Image: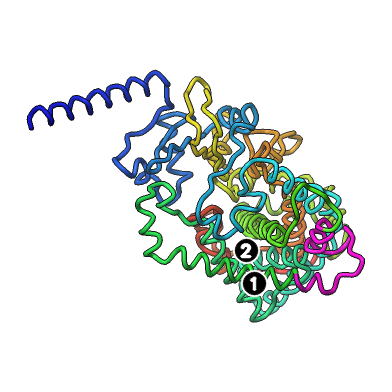
């Protein structure tokens, strides 16, 4: 017995020594101490982007954590992000295949979560060329302007009764209404609107939920017992039934469909009939691509709007400067149009500065490397999940002067863009897996913000000062909304 135990201990000692030597020879990235089984999961905190920044200050901009059995590389500098998003973009072009993604998004048949390969290239091409091109986005201008007009009338109603305006709620409604009209050809009002909003909220919550079984497989039973998978399947079924009804309705009323039709369902049905991609564009793919519009075109834009208005209310001098630009461009007209936006440079600077301080995705959607690779001298094992801390890079004092201050002027006469060309500001990602909906998102955001500022003066209820009293905390989840709704009083502009 003593001989057997001694032999086992010797073998374990040799294995540990071999693993230690092997690890050292591979020069892994710096890593904080981890616990058995769960690794560094206990260190995530309520807001991981803030936790990662704190850890990066100690362990560096390329840091390796372990979420259970999964190695996770956390990137916290623009130079390191460039290695992932530009230099080795192809190696890091894959996505983690998480169970909740598969349940909710048709087994990852959409652009955002599909594995990298020929299928993904083809469906991204559909999105870029047919759904989200600059020409296509421009053709939807009338929808955006009409919905903005309805929003302004609602705010006037509140103003006439001296009632405060829930800006967060209105931002959510207008972005949902625009997406529904451009994607599905209809919007949901009244009771159906409440049901749709609830369904979309539950969908987003299920999509962004942390699944412990993805990192510690033998603990997946916890997720089953909690009822999460059952709830996610129920939400997926309800959303599928909604999209199925919409697609069926479009098929029944189609007459000579072409790409100039008013909504994305018609365009996708037109592509189904006319394009040859090497695989059939079936009903599931159409619904998966429509889901992408709701994933990327609702919460992200409404989050940006509420943070823009938050910062403007906190900084009345900046709001005044933006109002002066808007009213000069409008030249006495009631509404700002999309043609006016090209003359509003300060507006664009406000948008960029808000995206810098409050990116809708503080952490870019994770990537996975398909092969072992050397990154800045560190060995990165194939299958490592890569998280780019978008939030911390945009606040890095080596790239930004007074990074914690809201200063739109930093973007005036500044070539930095938001489309992934400048790695110090990547709110929509970059490289192959960068968001294809940048043009759509900015068009929907700018026209709303311009009219909110042009048509109304804003202040907090009770004469409170925004810089001193506004709660600036964020929600938990993929998308960083305000933790509390933004509520303000609107006074119609008399000038």
Report the residue that reaches farthest toward the left: 2
Quadrant of the drawing holding the C terminus: bottom right
Along the horizontal axis of the image, is 30 left or right of 33?
right
Quadrant in the picture for residue 58:
top left
Along the horizontal axis of the image, is 236 left or right of 134?
left
Residue assigned mark 2: 459
In this view, the residue in front, 325 or 248, is 248
Please provide percent x and percent y for residue 257: 89, 64
- Disc 2/disc 1 C-alpha distance (Å): 43 Å
Magenta part, dominant SS: helix
Q: How many marks?
A: 2
Please provide percent x and percent y for residue 152: 75, 69
Report the residue that reaches farthest toward the right: 256
Quadrant in the picture for residue 283:
bottom right
Callout 2: helix, strand or loop?
strand
Q: Residue at x 78, y 63 (%)?
A: 265
> Is 266 one of the magenta-colored residues?
yes
Q: Name which of mark 2 and mark 1 comes first in the sequence.
A: 1
In this view, the residue in front, 6 or 376, is 6
Q: Is residue 428 visible?
A: yes
Range drawn in magenta? 248-272
In this view, the residue in front, 438 or 489, is 438
Callout 1: helix, strand or loop?
helix
Q: Is residue 329 visible?
A: no
Question: Considering only vertical position in the picture, is 91 above or below 376?
Answer: below
How many residues crowd around disc 2 within 10 Å: few (fewer than 14), some, or many (20 or more)? many
Residue assigned mark 1: 241
Q: Which color mode does the image show?
A: rainbow
Q: Residue at x 12, y 31 (%)?
A: 5
């Amino acid at each position: 017995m003593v001989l057997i135990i001694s032999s086992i201990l010797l073998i374990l000692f040799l294995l540990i020594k071999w693993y230690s030597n092997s690890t050292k020879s591979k020069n892994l990235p710096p890593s904080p101490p981890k616990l058995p089984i769960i690794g560094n999961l206990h260190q995530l905190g309520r807001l991981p982007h803030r936790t990662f920044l704190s850890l990066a200050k100690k362990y560096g901009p390329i840091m390796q954590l372990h979420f259970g059995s999964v190695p996770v590389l956390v990137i916290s500098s623009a130079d390191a992000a460039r290695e992932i998003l530009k230099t080795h973009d192809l190696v890091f072009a894959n996505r983690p295949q998480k169970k909740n993604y598969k349940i909710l998004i048709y087994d990852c048949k959409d652009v955002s979560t599909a594995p990298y390969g020929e299928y993904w290239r083809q469906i991204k091409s559909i999105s870029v060329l047919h759904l989200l091109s600059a020409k296509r986005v421009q053709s939807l201008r009338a929808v955006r302007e009409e919905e903005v007009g309805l929003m302004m009338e609602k705010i006037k109603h509140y103003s006439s009764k001296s009632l405060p305006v829930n800006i967060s709620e209105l931002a959510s409604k207008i972005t949902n209404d625009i997406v529904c009209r451009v994607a599905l050809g209809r919007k949901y009002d009244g009771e159906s609107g409440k049901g749709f909003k609830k369904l979309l909220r539950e969908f987003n919550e299920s999509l962004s939920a942390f699944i412990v079984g993805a990192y510690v497989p033998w603990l997946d039973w916890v997720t089953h017992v909690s009822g999460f998978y059952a709830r996610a399947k129920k939400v997926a079924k309800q959303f599928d039934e909604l999209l199925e009804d919409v697609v069926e309705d479009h098929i029944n009323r189609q007459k000579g469909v072409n790409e100039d039709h008013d909504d994305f369902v018609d365009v996708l049905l037109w592509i189904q009939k006319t394009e040859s991609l090497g695989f059939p564009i079936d009903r599931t793919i159409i619904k998966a691509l429509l889901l992408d519009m709701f994933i990327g075109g609702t919460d992200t834009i409404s989050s940006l709007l509420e943070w823009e208005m938050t910062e403007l209310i906190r900084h009345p001098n900046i709001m005044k400067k933006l109002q002066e630009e808007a009213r000069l461009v409008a030249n006495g007209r009631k509404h700002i149009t999309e043609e006016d936006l090209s003359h509003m440079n300060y507006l664009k600077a406000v948008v960029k500065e808000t995206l810098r301080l409050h990116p809708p995705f503080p952490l870019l959607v994770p990537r996975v490397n398909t092969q072992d690779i050397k990154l800045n001298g560190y060995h990165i094992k194939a299958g490592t999940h890569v998280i780019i801390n978008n939030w911390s890079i945009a606040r890095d004092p080596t790239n930004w002067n007074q990074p914690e201050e809201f200063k739109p002027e930093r973007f005036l006469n500044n070539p930095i863009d938001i489309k992934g060309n400048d790695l110090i500001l990547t709110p929509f990602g970059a490289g192959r897996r960068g968001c294809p909906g940048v043009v759509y998102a900015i068009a929907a955001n700018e026209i709303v913000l311009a009219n909110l500022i042009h048509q109304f003066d804003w202040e907090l209820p009770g004469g409170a000062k925004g810089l001193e009293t506004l709660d600036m905390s964020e929600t938990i989840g993929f998308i960083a909304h305000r933790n509390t709704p933004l509520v303000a009083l609107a006074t119609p502009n008399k000038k």
